[in-house]
Image (spheres, rainbow, N blue to C red):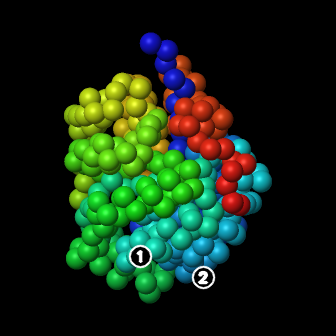
Amino acid sequence: MVRNSVIITCAITGSLHTPSMSPYLPITPEQIVSESVAAAEAGASIIHLHARDPRDGRPSADPDLFMQFLPRIKQQTGAVLNITTGGAPGMSLDQRLAAAERASPEMTSLNMGSINNGLFAGARRIKDYKYDWEKPFLEGGKNSYFENSFFNIETIMKRLGQEHGVRFEFECYDVGHIYNLAYMIEQKLYEGPLFLQFILGILGGVGAEIDNLLLMIRTAQRLFGNDVEWSVLAAGRHQMPMCVHNALIGGNVRVGLEDSLNLGRGELAKSSAEQVAKIRRILTELGYDIATPDEARARLALKGGNNVRF
């Protein structure tokens, strides 16, 4: 069996961490551009992107904000730009899709089910909040959930996949989400190749344990065949260990400040690029090649950067 190179995805800012958690979290379009370019130069072939209000860092679905950084990142890198469809808690489905429908990117994320997200558990560790919106935003997660019903998933596949030729990073927070994807494929809503992102260590989803990862991989291979592409996103302190384990068994990796604010134990990462450089160094020393953006495009059957609207 020929071993593929490892695709590194980098998630630059996300929508759940807040500015008071780290002074290095990118907020403004300028910061997002700088962080994305640095991550691509460090070895990321896919850049996953959210937008934030530059005034106070709160998550934003405003397509105009996305268009302030998407063209600039494209001009400076060859990376695949992957836009969120998850948005942030409280956003409607139309809000979550607005930027992707405007930009028609090569790839977007697609959460494969509704989930609880217990980031509220980290709110108590913040002593001083920088902005008034942060504490109620975090604590509100105790009484809310992220909704991606079957209707939502079908709508995203039709509006972005069928109408724009977008390919998806299928985000699976639990084993059941893999079966949700299998159902959608049975309904002829999407064709491979598939790129599954297994998300471990989120309170409300499956834990960051090797047995869980192996179960998700074997389930995906049983349902979709051994050629399925998969990656792992592990939250917080689990990021680097789980990424290394996943690469060792043939998978791809995702890092970035959306998923973990740390570089090592007790050490804040000063940028997502630091995390990319670290995982690239580890994998290279273990004898793995790192995929280029064009290699990732070929393996995931992306439409190419010339066919986007930015």
> Eyeballing the image, is 147 above or below 269?
below
In this rendering, position of residue 201 left or right of residue 274 = left
Residue name at image x 60 percent, y 37 percent = 297
Q: Which residue is mark 2?
A: 55
State the residue in front, 268 or 225: 225
Earlier-in-chain disc, 2 versus 1 = 2
Nearest to the eye among marks 2 and 1: give it: 1
The disc at residue 306 is none
Q: Residue 273, image x and y in percent?
A: 60, 48
Residue 257 visible: no
> Eyeballing the image, is 137 above or below 200?
below
The disc at residue 91 is 1
Quarter occupied by the N terminus: top left
Q: Residue 160, image x and y in percent?
A: 51, 58
In this rendering, position of residue 80 left or right of residue 187 = right
Residue name at image x 37 percent, y 73 percent = 89
- CA gap, disc 2 and disc 1: 19 Å
Circle 1: is it few (<14), some (14-19), or many (20+) Cα within 10 Å? some
State the residue in front, 200 or 65: 65
What secondary structure is marked by label 2? loop
- Spot the residue most to the bottom: 132
Residue 67 visible: yes
Q: Residue 44, image x and y in percent?
A: 60, 42
State the residue in front, 228 or 131: 228
For the residue marked with disc 1, what is the amino acid? Met
For the residue marked with disc 2, what is the amino acid? Arg
> Eyeballing the image, is 95 above or below 171?
below
Residue name at image x 71 percent, y 44 percent = 78
Q: Residue 283, image x and y in percent?
A: 51, 28
